[in-house]
Amino acid sequence: MLSIPIIAHPEDVEWFLPPSKSHMIRWIALSSQCKSSTRLSFQGIPGSDVVSMANCMEELGASIEKGPENWVIRGNRDGLHPPKRTLDCGNSATAAKILTAIVACFDSPVSIDGDASLRKRDFAHLISSLRDLGCEVSSEGLPYSITGPISRGWTRIDESVSSQTVSGMVLSSPGFESEVEVEMIGVAVSRWYRELTIEISKDCGWPGSYGKKMSLSAWDVETPENVEIPPEISLLPISILFDKLHGTRSMSGNLTNIPRPIMEAIGLVSLDNKEVDLRDSSDIIAPCAAIMALGRGGEIVGASHARGKESDRISSTVRMLASFGMEASETSAGLSVPGGQDPSTPENVVDCELDHRLAMTAGVLATRVGATLSGYEICRVTHPGFFEMILGHYEGL
């Protein structure tokens, strides 16, 4: 547990963002399937989700030199191969789903597992698609064993649940033995992550394109020699919450290339808009709800898929805010948040529910009123230096 005091000098906090795990995981997946080397350069410390992905790709035959400011990735000239042990994806659903699709190209069984939180995540849609394509999967969720190769040519993906299944299929397609037809159904959510997958794949030579019907077949991955990884912009709303609480301007530097869905949501929340649609950015629901509670309040809509995150992020956000004496109520597609609220010191320990974004939001609220958090270490999956950043050299860390 971590007891967080009311910070005396919030103006001294120098906010920084870690490298984007969404970018790094995708670049690691493709660079590991390339026969030349790729240098990923970044600022800050990659989170443990990124490390989990890298460790798993090393088990499949890639070589990754991890330095403090860059990682150099070299694919195996003979191609990827089945691992000798279970692939441990830690807390990362993105890594687990991409890796599941990659190892589905092997003709021998591969076991995949993760931590307690990841074991609760929904893998049913990915598993269903891979079974459509002729793979055997031992169970409906982690841990499971998957045996390929992909031997049949058609599946359907429901994009109203997650973008990770289609990302996994595209990023694993260099290893396909035959052409696969994919039909998209449902109203797509988290479209920016899908678009990121397509953009990075095209940068690596993917000849295909996204559509409601896609044909995927094997292709040669040719990655750039050098890649600059941007900061984890999805954490920007947490710094905005900090500034709302303390009247500071904590984020320095010129932030560019902010994804449109996140920028739109930040703009709506910052302007006290009464409705914020998080269809494409449900990851930021916890800090957005807290910011809205401090302001005029309003409705968060389009976020029903947030129930399938590290926690049921709609319900857990309500519980976390309630711990700080703040009110929000669940709706069918998000949250209803009254405005004009201020946090108060929690009477009990605040449970971070194995959810890194919940933990960071609770940590920032605690800097205003004080609180004790359990499970705060989960922040390391995305931002290993988060609490050191906001608390400095606080001896309680």
Image (cartoon, grey):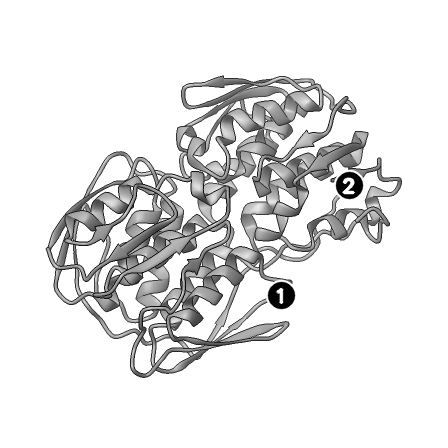
Q: Which element carries disc 1, helix, strand or loop?
A: loop
Return the mark for residue 220: none
Q: Quadrant of residue 238?
A: top right
Report the Cα–Cα distance between label 1 and label 2: 23 Å
The structure residue drawn at horizontal position 43% and vertical position 67%, both measured from the top left corner, is 28
Q: Position of residue 41 (x, y in %)?
A: 55, 71
User: Is disc 1 surrounded by few (<14), some (14 to 19) or many (20+) residues within 10 Å?
Assistant: some
| The N terminus, quarter of image | top right
Tell me if 288 is positioned left or right of 85 in this view.
right
Circle 2 residue: 248
Q: Position of residue 168 (x, y in %)?
A: 31, 55
Tell me if 149 is positioned left or right of 351 in this view.
left
Residue in the foreground of this view, choosing between 326 and 259: 326
Tell me if 233 is positioned left or right of 129 in this view.
right
Q: What amino acid is found at the position of numbered circle 1 in the picture?
A: Gln
Q: Position of residue 277 (x, y in %)?
A: 45, 30
Image position of 350 with respect to 235: above or below: above
The structure residue drawn at horizontal position 30% and vertical position 35%, both measured from the top left corner, is 160
The structure residue drawn at horizontal position 35% and vertical position 38%, both measured from the top left corner, is 189
Proximity of marks 1 and 2: CB atoms separated by less than 8 Å: no
Image position of 48 with respect to 301: above or below: below
Q: Quadrant of residue 178?
A: bottom left
Q: Which element carries disc 2, helix, strand or loop?
A: loop
Residue in the foreground of this view, choosing between 296 and 353: 353
Quick one: label 1 or label 2, which is nearer the N terminus?
A: 1
Q: Position of residue 307 (x, y in %)?
A: 44, 31
Residue 356 shows in this picture = yes
The structure residue drawn at horizontal position 49% and vertical position 39%, both measured from the top left corner, is 310
Circle 1 residue: 43
Residue 382 shows in this picture = no
Q: Quadrant of residue 33?
A: bottom left
For discs 1 and 2, the disc positioned in front in the rendered view:
1
